[in-house]
Amino acid sequence: MDAPAVEARRLTKTYGHGSGAVRALDDVSLSLARGTVAALLGPSGSGKSTLVKALGFVSPAEHGEVRFGGRVVVRDGVALADLAALRRRHLGFVFQKANLTTFLDARENVELACELSGKRDGRRRARELLAYLEVSHRERSYPETLSGGEQQRVAIARALANEPSLVLADEPTAALDGARSRVVMELFRRVAHERGAAVLIVTHDHRALDVFDVLYEMEDGQLRPATSPPHPPSRSSP
Amino acid sequence: MNLALRDVRRHLARFLGTAAGLGLLLTVVIAMQGIYAGMVDDATLLTRAMQADFWVVQRDTRGPFAEASRVDPSLEARAAAVPGVRAARPYTYQLIQRDHRGRVLRIALVGLGWPDDPGTSLPLVQGRRLQQPHGEMIADTSLGIPLGETLTLAGEAYRVVGLTRNALTSGGDSVAFLTVADTQLVALEQPPEALRLERERVLERLRRTDLGRGQPGLEDLAADPRWRAPALASPPHAAVLVQAGPESRAAVREVLAGWGDVTVYTQAEEEALLLGGVVQRARMQIGLFTVILTLTAGVIVTMVIYNLSLEKTHDLAVLKLMGAPSARLLGLVLQQSWLLGALGYAAAWALGEAVFPLFPRRVLLTPTLTWLAPLVTFGVVTVASVLGLRHVLRVDPARALEG
């Protein structure tokens, strides 16, 4: 059996000191297999973003370890690998706002991600991805001229440019209406199932929970499985 | 993919506007340096053009360019008689201001020791040297008097027979070369009424003496307009220029320096006096201006680059989150700084080529300035990008996740 795309073991992170200290991650363990699309639910301040930062090698947890592709890359807050290189080659990020690079057009945003990951023929690949996400007609448009939905599609194309093992999305549909929100969630499901990436999506949007293979819920820094989704999880375990 | 160029392309108008502003500043910096170089060149050109080994000037003075110097006309013959002296010729220098065809001309008149020196050492760009002792002049092109035109000085017509370029004084005044005798005619110019009053004064003095009362014929002589007072017959020179053979220079200097009425300077010493005395203050002033303008340009570029970096904070955070190497992001800022400097410098150079010839003072773009100015610009914009670079390094990729 393949190693999980990412595996977190007993992550702990505290903000602040003394009586004002807040435990954002409290002994969190998680495993996501490739091809799985998982939702991370929970109220604001429950630790969701902290977990995404820890899994995305942006802000490591103080204690615990994160394995990537079976290899320990962060242990007790210490990086054991080049984290920027890991992000560049194996991770994709999608944000609440699309966060496209403002001075690059749609195609260049995707092309740059290809280039950073060392993929050859970035332009061709960028065009393919934009076509895959049905936004190729806007490839020469700058971000501010795209609609919210188009921006998110370009952002997803960018996140897929390096053929990631893990896609982390932080409330990617927060700025979209219900119909567009569902379309984007469906896209993530396609990405996970067709391209074999593990996808973890932080969301408050309960209207599209049926697209997820597995649901997690965070509260006060603790992670637990949430209500079972309509589709059975394919290859994941908490 | 070059991110710096992509960003410039996206904000082209603003970037070009900033480069143009920087270009204007650099134009002033280059102009300042060019004016100083022109001033030094002008100051030394006049002394170099004379090709003298020694400048013999009035005792305890620093020569005609620094202060008034008067030497007796007999000094020329005395100096020529010193063993080892090849040639001695008088030198006069005076500033005049005259109207000519509706323009006010400020002219530095330099006397040439005719017939030994018809202007042989002058770098003519058009025309010829002096060929007669009176009524001809060699003028600098900056006076705007074309070849063949005549200029009236002291009631006499002087035809321009030769033109020089950049023969200017350290004060920026254009030089015209005449024979020493002609410059003295101009120097002694007196209006007819002044001459009439002078004759009246002489007659009055004569009538008060026994000699005048006893010899009435003397009154006729004093009243004759062709007669001149003996004191005005031999006006002094500003200096005498001496040429000596290399083998006899030391000996010649020793003899000349021994005379009680003169001080002797070599060509190099005269140039040093000129630069040290006349140009020194301008050098300091221009130097200070240049430093202040360079610092101003540096501060402006710093703020522009820093603001460009600040505006891109979120983009930088996203790029960092995507794993973009720091070197690539630092390169984005640094390349933009360099591009700004290059465009600013190119604009300054192009603007300078167009407007420097219109400046009242000569702007001399020396070879040193030509390679030093872009190097300094490069250094300034590189240093100016430090704040921007620091900002890039401090951007936390986690900011990209903060909405």
Image: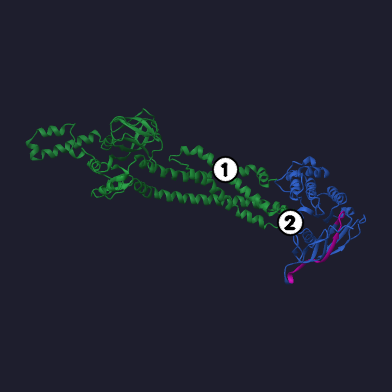
Chain colours: A blue, B green
Q: Which mark is residue B20?
A: 1
Secondary structure mostly seen in magenta is strand
Chain of the residue displaying label 2: A
Can residue B22 be seen? Answer: yes
For disc 1, the chain is B
Query: Do tag 1 and tag 2 residues touch (Cβ < 8 Å)?
Result: no
Q: Position of residue B340 (x, y in %)?
A: 60, 46
In the image: residue B145, left or right of residue B211:
right
When asked about the image quadrant of residue B181, the answer is: top left
Query: Is-magenta flag for residue A26?
Result: yes
Residue extent of the magenta highlight: A19-38
* Residue B170 can be seen in this image: no
Please tell me which residue lies in front, B56 or B3: B56
Residue B253 counted in the magenta span = no
Single out the residue that lies furthest toward the front.
B247
Q: Which residue is mark 2?
A: A84
Q: Residue at x 60, y 47 (%)?
A: B338
